[in-house]
Image (tube, rainbow, N blue to C red):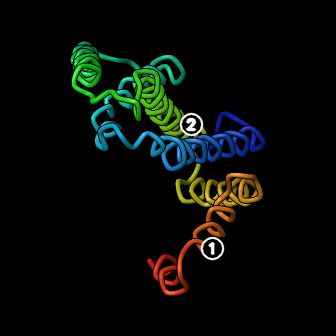
Amino acid sequence: MKGNDSIIIIVFLIFISSYFDFIEFILSTNYIPYYFKSSGSLEMRLGGILTISSALFFYYLLKLDIFKHQFVSLLIIGICLIIIIICEFIFQDINIFLTYGDFFIKILLIFFVHFFNSLLDSIEKYIIEFDFMDIFLILCLEGLFGFLITFIYSFSASSYVIQLKKIYSENSGGQFTFFIFY
């Protein structure tokens, strides 16, 4: 079957999806753990953001229908998300280590993680269903682009190489060996 887009657009979309996956990973591993004084399960409990944003992308970008029962489900998920956020602000232990501003930034970062994940899902669905690409070829190209992006990022100031050097200098040889092994 012949796809709707040229090969250049498809490769560009796969590169963009790899970039969104990279941004999502960096936010989840480097920035969200900075706010460790809040609930560790908050990212999972706010997973409804992913469902709602994916549904909106599928509806507005891919022109897929949302039926009445799906709309009601999204409405219930949205109400539950609002309740979760309000309860978190009420019951979160706010002190000098975690202010309301920091807690709001953590929720905003979690929102961005789910937003980029839903963009990734939307792009992959578009490429598979409208351009009739093989899923394994898409995964192979995403892996290649992800490797290139990560390789370029490894030379930045906050990269893993610098963090690894810091871990090596602060720990003994045995602890560093166990760190690399695990």
Cα distance in 3D space between marks 2 and 1: 42 Å
Residue depicted at 37% across the width and 23% down the height: 52
Q: Work out which quarter of the rendered image holds the N terminus and state it.
A: top right
Residue 73 versus residue 38 in the image, above or below: above
How far from the left and from the top, in percent, is residue 169? 63, 73
Picture disc at residue 169:
1
Residue 13 versus residue 173 in the image, above or below: above
**Foreground residue among 96 and 55:** 96
How far from the left and from the top, in percent, is residue 181? 48, 81
Residue 114 sits in which quadrant? top left
Residue type at mark 1: give it. Ser
Residue type at mark 2: give it. Ile
How far from the left and from the top, in percent, is residue 78? 29, 17
Q: Horizontally, is 156 left or right of 2 in the view?
A: right
Whichever of labels 2 and 1 marks the residue nearer the N terminus, that label is: 2
Depth check, mark 2 against mark 1: the one in front is 1
**Foreground residue among 103 and 67:** 103
Residue 90 sits in which quadrant? top left
Q: Horizontally, is 49 left or right of 160 in the view?
A: left
Residue depicted at 32% across the width and 27% down the height: 94
What SS does tag 2 mark? helix
Residue 123 sits in which quadrant? top right
Residue 38 versus residue 157 in the image, above or below: above
Which residue lies under the disc numbered 2?
123
How far from the left and from the top, in percent, is residue 98? 40, 31
- For the residues labelled 2 and 1, say whether their Cβ atoms are less than 8 Å apart: no
Neighbourhood count class around disc 1 (C-alpha, 10 Å): few under 14, some 14–19, many 20 upward: few
**Foreground residue among 116 and 34:** 34
Residue lying farthest to the bottom in this orientation: 174
